[in-house]
Amino acid sequence: MIDEHDVTQRSAREAAAAAAFKPPAPVRERERRRVKAAATLALLVLAVLGLASYEFVANAGHAQRAATAAHPRVRGPMIPAGTPAAAVSAATAGTAAASPATTAPATTAPATTAPATTASAATAPATTAPATTAPASTPPPRVLTVASVAAFGPAGTTDGDNPGNVAQAVAGDPAIPWDTDWYASPDFFDLQGGTGLLLDMGRTVTVSSVDVSLGGEPGASLQLRAGSEPTLAWLPTVAGVSDAGGTVQLRPTAPVHVRYVLIWFTNLPPNPDGTYQASIYQVVIQGQP
């Protein structure tokens, strides 16, 4: 009975120990499922990353090939050191001409320096500039028509010398000139500043020169005066000559824009009678109307 009791007690203790050290079956099954799920998720993540990497690399390669096709590189000629600048320019120009049309934008920079190597062609239009501006330059002067002529004295047209014969001053006949009054002194005994002829152009014109043909002896001093009003104060002196005879030219330093031209004697030449008197048979005014 004692032995049977011991055997029973020992069997019970061994069964309890075995049950204590044996893990429950459901716990191990859950761990296996968790490991399988983690492995599956890891595989899916790796698959997605691999696909994304492949797409990125493929797109980058396609873009690079498209850019290379659109803008192919053009290799220039090998130029040895010490080659003259003219030869380098010629070689560069040949390379640019041989390159395809799509490479034209890449070679626009040398094109901007082309005028430096083709100076004669680039400056050719500049040599034609005077021809294009010629119409804007001042045309040559021409003879202007005088509207009227009047004898003119210190007080104006009211006290001029020999007013009835003034038309002969522009008639061009040396045998029948216009004469001033005769005076006992060449300088009018300082009683007056002078005497002369007033020419009215009828409108404002540009006067560049006046040719006066004098009759009689030389020795006259005369002024060319011009202005916009027929009074001595408004007719400033623009040219003058002394001890004149024959045909003299009175030329302003610059063309003047005036209506009235006055030929004003300040000294008279001698005449055969022992007095002093001036005569004019032709006046030619040149300029622009």
Image (cartoon, grey):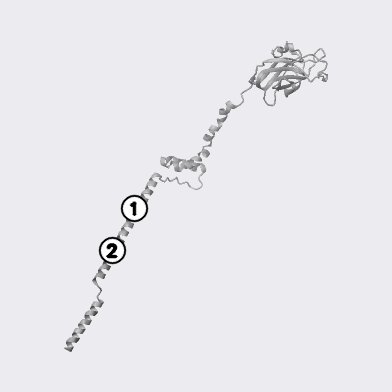
* Mark nearer the viewer, 1 or 2: 2
Structural crowding at the residue carrying mark 2, measured as other residues with C-alpha within 10 Å and reported as few (<14), some (14–19) or many (≥20): few
Q: Is residue 205 left or right of residue 233?
A: left
Q: Position of residue 56 (x, y in %)?
A: 36, 53
Q: Position of residue 226 (x, y in %)?
A: 71, 22
The answer to whether residue 102 shows anywhere in this view is yes
> Is 28 rendered above or below residue 275?
below
Residue holding disc 2: 37
For numbered disc 1, what is the local secondary structure?
helix
The amino acid marked with disc number 2 is: Ala
Q: Nearer the viewer, residue 70 or 77?
A: 70
Q: Amino acid at mark 1?
A: Glu
**Residue picked out by circle 1:** 55
Residue at (68% x, 15% y) in the render:
148
Label 1 and label 2: CA atoms lie apart by: 27 Å
Asked whether residue 100 appears in the rendered view, the answer is no
Q: Secondary structure at mark 2?
A: helix
Q: Residue at x 36, y 49 (%)?
A: 62
x, y percent for residue 36:
27, 64
Query: Which residue occupies the extreme bottom position in the image?
Result: 2
Number of disc labels: 2
Q: Nearer the viewer, residue 211 or 180?
A: 180
